Image (spheres, coloured by chain):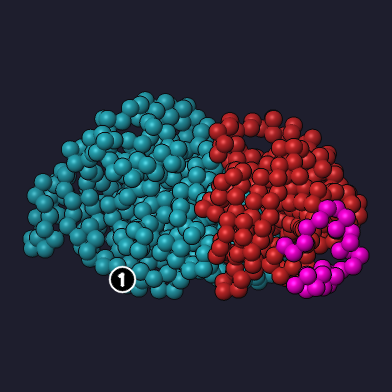
Chain colours: A red, B cyan
């Protein structure tokens, strides 16, 4: 579903992605692990189309078509959803107002009728239960005053409402305790399907105990240097990133 | 009319080049005592009103134009303005919507202006407008039944001279400020509303005014009086972008509320702001003041100002009656090269008076906006309470927002709270909303509407819906 082909990207004059090749097929969950400053969060910004980053070489293909020329919202309309590492607060805008507008914007772009208020509320209540979010949050300003756990669960809740094809989770585990982690993983797992794909960027292996990946990729210095299955994640956790670097050095 | 003719011939030198046909003439530019007399004669005003105007004019001549606001505009030449113009003849007006500038029509569409109002707002010749006469008649009948007096100021001078004489200038005396003096000397027309004891005006006084918005003059004079226990909600203006004939608009609005009365005055102003380089827009210099004369009286000002090149106004409340309440809710938007210096004055005089100020300023493009507020609590105003919140939102990095709060408290028994915030629409907020499928413009609108929510909820409902659309339209192109 998503292909990164020899992708090079920079921010300003600094190259960050130095030739990333990745294929995430439909129905699979892939995990990316890497040390700080490896460029993993740049990866998610570049896939979603953030204007701070410039692609200098290579391509990003979604469902077979290049998306390099598409705007941020156009990529969202195609079905790409990113769960943010640090969800922003938007005072004065109720979560329900925002979510309904978002849902209807995506529906409209795909030729569907907007959802009516009753339908929206019904769906929202059901999905909030899935991520154990109190329904009062719907009426509060988006993310304002939400705890770290609530913000992350709100991201998964939005995902459940928008039902995207491709879910990009940018460090969904940062700042979460083990209970919240389980709820987030549970929410994502509930959305797994043969028609969807998930790419989760994670710091620690713990999340992957609950959200078991089909493939794990290790990201170092702007490139994927090693790919394995779920066991690779555990090995990296045990032996550290230096082990991977040493392995790479020895192979040369 | 004869008096006017007499005046013309007396002037002998014809320095100001009066057109010979007095019935439908436009005064050549210039301002002196004879112009004031001309205006008064044209309207066949009683002697006392002419004298009132002349006194104001003489005071104006001695005053100097204030230069302290945080706005700049090329100096105005008061001698090059015409102070009287007859209404446009029907032959000179567009004969149908087809003759109206398509850009104006496109804006009407975006703002959701009802079809039957578009022609009137575009200044199309009156007999082409459907239903306007029948709307006006039903309106007038309902008001008559309730005992509410609502008519043009000019008509009121003739039909209710005692009321005009009693209240005119009682809230904004002619010598109050430069523009009030000018207005008092040369005001053309405006509205007069009088709600008798215990009457709640049965409808919002707006529809009628809307249809006439395109024809309002440059020196409007409005007076609204609510007797004991009376209530009225008055809406001024509309969201449609109006091009005015003249550049300077210096209106005066006076409100008087007696015991237990409530006046709600809402304004939506979207006058021509000038082109994208800031040329040619309207100067909106208005003096608006409400007198809470009676105990437990209440006056609320709500404004959404998105137009004009320069907006300079401080709708204010004099809280004279014990337990009286003054409120000011404002959203002001300055985009491109617009400037605004706006705010309010809440003067606490009686006991246990309360005032609330919520000001939301949005600056985009090269806009410059200032909030200027005065909360004054006199020595005898024991138990006074004020809450002020002024927030600014900046869009882009070329605009400015400034705050000039003045607080003067002369009694130990008062509570005055002031909160202020300045924020920018963050890149990450926009990115987040776009990643959820919203276009950049929709994202900005959403954030701005959230910012203005507290003020919009004070507007009469239909106005609130329009005001939201108006902000969206006014912010087009502000980002990126």
Kindly identify the residue that appears in the image at 91 percent across and 55 percent down. Answer: A178
Which quadrant of the view contains residue B101? top left
Which structural element holds mark 1? loop
Q: Position of residue B283 (x, y in %)?
A: 36, 60
Q: Which residue is mark 1?
A: B75
Kindly identify the residue that appears in the image at 24 percent across and 60 percent down. Answer: B81
Q: Nearer the viewer, residue B258 or B141?
A: B141
In magenta segment, residue A233: yes
The answer to whether one can see residue A136 in this image is no
In magenta segment, residue B40: no
Q: Report the quarter where the N terminus of chain A lies.
A: top right
B421 shown above or below B307: below
Which quadrant of the view contains residue B124? top left
B9 shown above or below B152: below
Which quadrant of the view contains residue A238? bottom right
What range of the chain is rendered magenta?
A224-252
Kindly identify the residue that appears in the image at 41 percent across and 39 percent down. Answer: B109
Q: Is residue B339 left or right of residue B49?
A: right
Q: Nearer the viewer, residue B286 or B115?
A: B115
Structural crowding at the residue carrying mark 1, measured as other residues with C-alpha within 10 Å and reported as few (<14), some (14–19) or many (≥20): few
Give the chain of mark 1: B
Q: Position of residue A92 (x, y in %)?
A: 66, 52
Determine the main secondary structure of the stretch shown in magenta. Answer: helix
């Amino acid at each position: 579903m998503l292909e990164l082909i020899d992708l090079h990207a920079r921010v300003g004059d600094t190259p960050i992605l130095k030739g990333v090749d990745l294929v995430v097929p439909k129905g699979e969950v892939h995990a990316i692990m890497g040390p700080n400053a490896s460029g993993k969060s740049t990866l998610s910004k570049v896939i979603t189309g953030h204007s701070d980053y410039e692609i200098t070489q290579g391509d990003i293909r979604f469902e077979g078509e290049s998306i390099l020329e598409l705007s941020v919202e156009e990529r969202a309309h195609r079905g790409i959803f990113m769960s943010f590492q640090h969800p922003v607060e938007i005072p004065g805008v109720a979560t329900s107002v925002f979510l309904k507008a978002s849902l209807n914007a995506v529906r409209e772009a795909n030729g569907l009728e907007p959802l009516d208020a009753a339908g929206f509320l019904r769906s929202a209540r059901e999905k909030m239960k899935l991520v154990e979010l109190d329904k009062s949050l719907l009426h509060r300003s988006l993310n304002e005053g939400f705890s770290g756990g609530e913000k992350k669960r709100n991201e998964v809740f939005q995902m459940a409402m928008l039902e995207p094809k491709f879910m990009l989770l940018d460090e969904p585990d940062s700042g979460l305790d083990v209970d919240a982690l389980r709820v987030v993983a549970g929410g994502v797992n509930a959305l797994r399907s043969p028609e969807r794909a998930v790419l989760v960027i994670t710091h620690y292996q713990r999340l992957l105990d609950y959200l078991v990946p089909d493939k794990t990729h290790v990201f170092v210095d702007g490139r994927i240097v090693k790919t394995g299955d779920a066991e690779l994640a555990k090995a990296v956790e045990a032996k550290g990133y230096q082990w991977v670097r040493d392995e790479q050095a020895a192979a040369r | 009319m004869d008096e006017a003719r007499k005046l013309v011939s007396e002037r002998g030198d014809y320095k100001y080049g009066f057109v010979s046909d007095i019935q439908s003439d436009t005064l050549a530019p210039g301002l002196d005592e004879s112009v004031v007399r001309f205006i008064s004669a044209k309207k066949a005003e009683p002697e006392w009103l002419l004298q009132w105007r002349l006194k104001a004019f003489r005071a104006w001549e001695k005053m100097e134009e204030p230069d302290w606001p945080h706005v700049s505009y090329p100096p105005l030449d008061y001698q090059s303005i015409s102070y009287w113009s007859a209404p446009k003849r029907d032959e000179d007006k567009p004969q149908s919507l087809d003759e109206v500038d398509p850009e104006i029509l496109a804006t009407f569409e975006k703002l959701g202006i009802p079809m039957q109002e578009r022609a009137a707002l575009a200044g199309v010749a009156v007999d082409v407008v459907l239903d306007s006469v029948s709307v006006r008649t039903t309106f007038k009948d309902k008001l008559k039944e309730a005992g509410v007096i609502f008519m043009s100021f000019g008509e009121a001078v003739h039909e209710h001279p005692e009321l005009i004489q009693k209240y005119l200038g009682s809230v904004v005396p002619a010598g109050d400020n430069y523009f009030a003096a000018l207005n008092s000397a040369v005001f053309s027309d405006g509205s007069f509303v009088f709600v008798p004891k215990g009457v709640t005006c049965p409808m919002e006084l707006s529809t009628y005014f809307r249809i006439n918005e395109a024809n309002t003059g440059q020196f409007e004079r409005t007076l609204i009086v609510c007797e004991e226990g009376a209530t009225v909600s008055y809406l001024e203006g509309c969201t449609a972008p109006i091009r005015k004939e003249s550049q300077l608009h210096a209106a005066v609005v006076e409100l008087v509320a007696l015991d237990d009365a409530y006046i709600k005055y809402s304004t939506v102003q979207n006058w021509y702001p000038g082109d994208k380089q800031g040329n040619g827009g309207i100067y909106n210099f208005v003096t608006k003041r409400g007198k809470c004369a009676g105990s437990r009286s209440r006056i609320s000002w709500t404004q959404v100002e998105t137009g004009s090149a320069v907006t300079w106004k401080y709708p204010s409340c004099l809280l004279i009656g014990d337990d009286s309440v003054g409120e000011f809710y404002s959203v002001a938007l300055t985009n491109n090269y617009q400037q605004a210096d706006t705010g309010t004055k809440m003067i606490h005089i009686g006991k246990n008076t309360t005032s609330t100020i919520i000001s939301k300023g949005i600056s985009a493009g090269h806009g410059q906006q200032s909030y200027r507020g005065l909360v004054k609590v006199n020595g005898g105003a024991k138990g006074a309470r004020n809450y002020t919140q002024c927030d600014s939102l900046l869009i882009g990095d070329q605009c400015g927002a400034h705050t000039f709060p003045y607080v003067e408290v002369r009694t130990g028994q008062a509570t005055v709270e002031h909160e202020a915030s300045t924020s920018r629409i963050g890149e990450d907020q926009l990115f987040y909303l776009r990643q959820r499928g919203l276009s950049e413009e929709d994202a900005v609108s959403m954030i701005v509407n959230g910012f203005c929510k507290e003020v919009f909820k004070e507007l009469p409902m239909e106005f609130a819906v329009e005001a939201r659309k108006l902000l969206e339209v006014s912010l087009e192109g502000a980002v990126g």
